[in-house]
């Protein structure tokens, strides 16, 4: 996703949204993921492991879903370029 965010400079609407999406990705990677792991690893020795592990899995699932939503919002530049090439070729070769 981060690589794709770097490539969106070709289209203005994507370029405008990229900083917000990058901030969302940074929030997940730099804040939320470490907080989940620190909470799990820093739990009291008397805390039963199974409920704590279940909470960690739930948290990681939520982070994964958030990251997947971000990936879906970031345009695939290669796919877009392929579509543009196809459109150009149709215009050139489909003329009567």
Image (cartoon, rainbow, N blue to C red):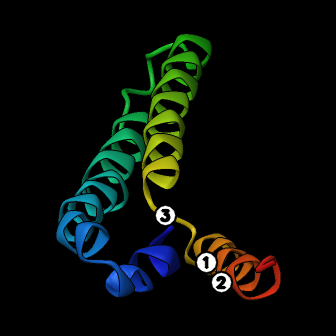
State if disc 3 and disc 1 touch (CB < 8 Å). no
Of residue 60 and residue 83, the one placed in the foreground of this image is 83
Considering only vertical position in the picture, is 57 above or below 66?
above
The residue to which callout 1 is attached is 84
Whole-percent x, y for residue 92 in the image: 73, 88
Label 2 neighbourhood size at 10 Å, few (<14), some (14-19), many (20+)? Answer: few
Q: Residue furthest front?
A: 96
Residue where numbered disc 2 is placed: 88
- Report the mark closest to the observer, 1 or 2: 2
Say which label, 1 or 3, has the lower sequence index: 3
Q: Nearer the viewer, mark 1 or mark 3?
A: 1
44 vs 12: above or below: above
Give the residue at x 44% y 17%. Answer: 46
Tell me the element at label 3. loop
Q: Quadrant of the C terminus?
A: bottom right
Could you say which is closer to the camera, residue 28 or residue 51? Answer: 28
Which residue lies under the disc numbered 3? 75
Mark 3 or mark 2, whichever is nearer to me: 2
Q: Secondary structure at mark 2?
A: helix
Using residue 12 as the reference point, say whether residue 72 is left or right of it. right
The percent coordinates of residue 65 (x first, y second) are 51, 34
Q: Where does the image place residue 91, in percent across and percent down from the top left?
A: 68, 80
Instruction: Report the residue at 37% width, 86% height from top.
Output: 10
Q: Secondary structure at mark 1?
A: helix
Whether the residues at callouts 1 and 2 have beta carbons within 8 Å, the answer is: yes
Q: Residue at x 45, y 27 (%)?
A: 45
Side (left or right) of 92 relative to 2: right
């Amino acid at each position: 996703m981060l690589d794709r965010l770097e490539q969106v400079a070709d289209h203005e609407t994507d370029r405008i949204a990229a900083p917000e999406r990058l901030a969302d990705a940074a929030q997940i990677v730099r804040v939320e993921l470490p907080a989940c792991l620190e909470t799990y690893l820093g739990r009291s020795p008397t805390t039963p492991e199974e409920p704590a592990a279940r909470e960690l899995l739930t948290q990681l699932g939520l982070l994964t879903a958030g990251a997947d939503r971000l990936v879906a919002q970031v345009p695939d530049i290669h796919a877009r370029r392929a579509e543009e090439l196809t459109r150009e070729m149709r215009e050139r070769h489909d003329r009567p």
